Image (cartoon, rainbow, N blue to C red):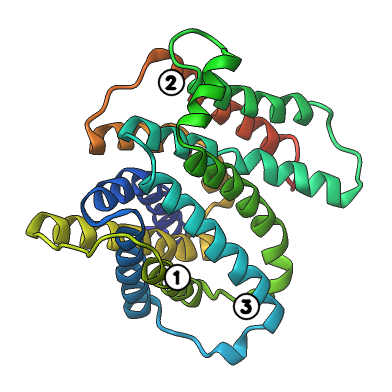
């Protein structure tokens, strides 16, 4: 098999693994607690990354990359995992994931604002479409309803706030990390830092003790390995894979994630929810297409 194909397949596998994360995180946190379960997942993921990718010396990274990039990564992962774990129901957890997928459009928006370069005006209605798509998914079966949106947010303000904050944090991370990293990848250290931060939060919280069962152990190992494998395979994919194909495929993650989440969590989603997911996906694709670097 052509080497380039192998790298591309690795990148595609990473996207599929990431698409399973929402359902797996929710599955584990239901059994081990929102904070303790997340801390366990990132601990297993960290161990897996150390075994697969190794642990590079901290001295090879710039201090700004470790502090700023690492801080944004840890904050985002905590926001996402806690938003999923603290959701009132499995259906609401999937709603959190769709809010999270505002980040591709926000990434483009921040990049455009920072560059001061002329861009195709289509991206602005595309960004609005992504927010409209999220609002559409959160409005239930009654079309777009501001009242329903307010009621949903009021039912669990912590999860909704964390999900929205996470989308903005990841968009910022995507815009500044490439400049700070200088071609280096500290993902293993960032995973370890996320696990430590979650354990600290667990220690100071009033969450109950973690009770391990055989099913919880299996789900935990699966979630940690899938999460770690996603980052490890993506690192392989971007080395020599077809980045145009990988970029295009990655923007279908909201649809893939929703499909896998519904399957893993055994829930049914409404037609309107799927319509909103498709809107978010189309908006992300439009933003990428009209701002991509042309060869």
Going 60% across and 76% down the picture, which residue do you hit? 184
For the residues labelled 3 and 2, say whether their Cβ atoms are less than 8 Å apart: no
As helix, strand or loop, the secondary structure at mark 3 comes to helix
For the residues labelled 1 and 3, say whether their Cβ atoms are less than 8 Å apart: no
User: Are there few (<14), some (14-19), or many (20+) residues within 10 Å of tag 2?
Assistant: some
**Left or right, 41 with reference to 200:** left
Name the residue nearer the viewer: 44 or 244. 44
The extreme top residue here reads 142
Going 32% across and 34% down the picture, which residue do you hit? 89
**Is 137 located above or below residue 15 in the figure?**
above
Distance, label 3 to label 2, CA atoms, is: 38 Å
For disc 1, the marked residue is: 191
The extreme left residue here reads 214
As helix, strand or loop, the secondary structure at mark 1 comes to helix
For disc 2, the marked residue is: 274
For disc 3, the marked residue is: 66
Going 36% across and 64% down the picture, which residue do you hit? 228
Q: Position of residue 180 (x, y in %)?
A: 71, 72
Sequence-first tag of 3 and 2 = 3
**Left or right, 54 with reference to 184:** left
């Amino acid at each position: 098999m052509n080497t380039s194909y192998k790298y591309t397949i690795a990148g595609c596998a990473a996207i599929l693994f990431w698409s399973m994360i929402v359902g797996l995180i929710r599955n584990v946190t239901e059994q081990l607690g929102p904070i303790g379960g997340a801390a366990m997942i990132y601990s297993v993921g960290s161990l897996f990354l150390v075994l697969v990718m190794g642990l590079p010396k901290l001295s090879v990274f710039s201090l700004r990359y470790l502090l700023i990039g690492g801080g944004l990564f840890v904050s985002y992962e905590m926001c996402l995992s806690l938003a999923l774990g603290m959701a009132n129901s499995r259906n609401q957890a999937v709603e959190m994931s769709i809010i999270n997928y505002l980040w591709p459009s926000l990434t483009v928006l921040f990049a455009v604002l920072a560059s001061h370069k002329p861009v195709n005006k289509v991206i602005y209605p595309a960004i609005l479409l992504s927010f409209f798509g999220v609002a559409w998914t959160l409005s239930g079966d009654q079309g777009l309803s501001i009242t329903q949106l307010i009621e949903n947010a009021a039912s669990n303000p912590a999860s909704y706030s964390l999900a929205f904050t996470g989308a903005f944090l990841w968009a910022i991370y995507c815009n500044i990390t490439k400049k700070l990293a200088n071609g280096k990848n500290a993902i293993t250290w960032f995973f370890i830092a996320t696990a430590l931060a979650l354990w600290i939060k667990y220690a100071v919280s009033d969450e109950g003790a973690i009770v391990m069962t055989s099913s919880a152990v299996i789900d935990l190992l699966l979630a940690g390995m899938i999460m770690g494998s996603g980052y490890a395979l993506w690192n392989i994919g971007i080395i020599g894979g077809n980045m145009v194909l990988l970029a295009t495929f990655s923007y279908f993650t909201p649809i893939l994630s929703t499909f896998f989440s519904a399957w893993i969590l055994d829930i049914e989603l409404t037609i309107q929810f799927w319509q909103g997911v498709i809107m978010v996906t189309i908006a992300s694709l439009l933003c990428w297409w009209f701002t991509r670097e042309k060869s």
